[in-house]
Image (spheres, coloured by chain):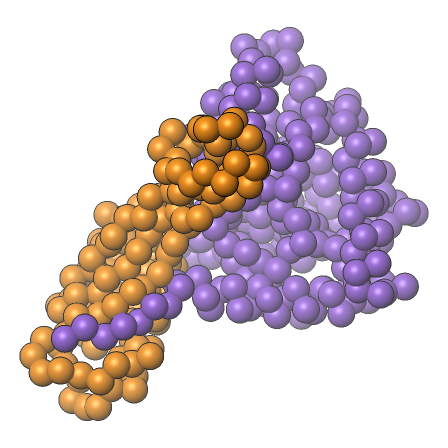
Amino acid sequence: MQVSVLRKVLDANDLIAEENRKEFDAHGCFVVNLMSAPGSGKTAILERTLRALDGRLTAAVIEGDVMGTLDADRLLPLGVPVVQINTDPLFGGECHLDARMIRNALSALPLDGVDVVFIENVGNLVCPAEFSVGEDRKVMVLSVAEGEDKPLKYPLMFRVSDLLLLNKTDLLNYLDFDLPQFRANAAHVNPGLPIVEFSARTGQGFERWVDWLLREVAERRGRCGAI
Amino acid sequence: MHELSICYGILEAAMGALEPLPRPLPRVERVTMRIGRLTAVVPDTLIHYFDLLTPGTDLEGAVLNIEEVPIRGHCDECAASFEIETLSFTCPRCGSGFVELLSGRELEVVSLDTAGEEVPCAS
């Protein structure tokens, strides 16, 4: 005999993600889920972004890593509230952040007066794309050293992202990275994906990125009716 | 890489469907799920975890049966529907990039097959 089930496996996660979103909405926070492979520069981008936003937007950060507090330690001197999540310090841990981890982190992160929350996901081009955490936008980072073929190898993350920061462009002269080919590959998978040529080191692309953030935060305020 | 947590989700969904059934529970022979080709899930790894996690539960002895779902798109401009095999999300008919996904991201438990007598539907 067959018993009908028809249940989405990620229903439980999506439900908690929805609760997180309501919590963020209640505080008028715009939330960015920042995803990339390990080493593509997420934390460096955050360091520079937090400095650039100082005095313009109030930010908070949730750091996701398998182990350790290295990333949170880097951001703490910037005077921004940071919560570090370790996905599993004992067994190597999960390869992504899920909605439950974010919910637990929220108890340690005061959201009053916060305009924008950056969630730095665990470095991984595959799994984080599958799990919603209650974010408004998914922003992915790809560094040019990773190669122009990545959209074709990891299509889901490119497909679900709302903005791509193509980082480490200051290295382009030293690499064989084919920029037009990369743009074509990305357009194959997600033709509407805006790509910002970017360097956390030189600051290239920062103006566009900060403008994007300011615009999104303003829109979020309009939607939520927050002051 | 996250198949273990996905597998816990499968067990939760399947056992949730067994909950309203009268005891003693019938033996579950098969759990059928649908996985879209665009999901970041490795079916073989899922099966491996399923076999590790089910002994001692109401799903002991059940086989995880996975139906793959192709990636299908629908063009917003020319209304064509098509299968996406090469991971190019542009419309093969008119070249538009405004393509909506119709399928390919499924990750759902569809049904359980139980041994023996007929059991009431657990919807």
Chain identity for the colour purple used in the image? A
Q: Which chain is orange?
A: B
In which quadrant of the rendered view does residue B33 lie? bottom left
Which residue is painted at 69% across and 17% down in the image?
A170
Extreme front residue here?
B78
Residue A90 visible in the snapshot: yes
- Left or right: A201 as drawn, with respect to A163: right
Q: Is residue A161 above or below residue B109?
A: above
Please state which of residues B89 and A139 is positioned toward the viewer in this rendering: B89
- Give the residue furthest to the right: A55
Q: Quadrant of the N terminus of chain A?
A: bottom left
Residue A136, position as x, y percentages in the image: 67, 54
- In percent of width and height, residue B96 lies at 55, 30
x 78%, y 56%: residue: A220
Query: Is A91 on the left-hand or right-hand side of A219?
Result: left
- Answer whether residue A37 is visible to the viewer in this image: no
Question: From the viewer's perspective, is residue B100 above or below residue A131?
Answer: above
Q: Position of residue A129 (x, y in %)?
A: 51, 46
Tell me: A52 left or right of A37: right
Q: Nearer the viewer, residue A139 or A146?
A: A139
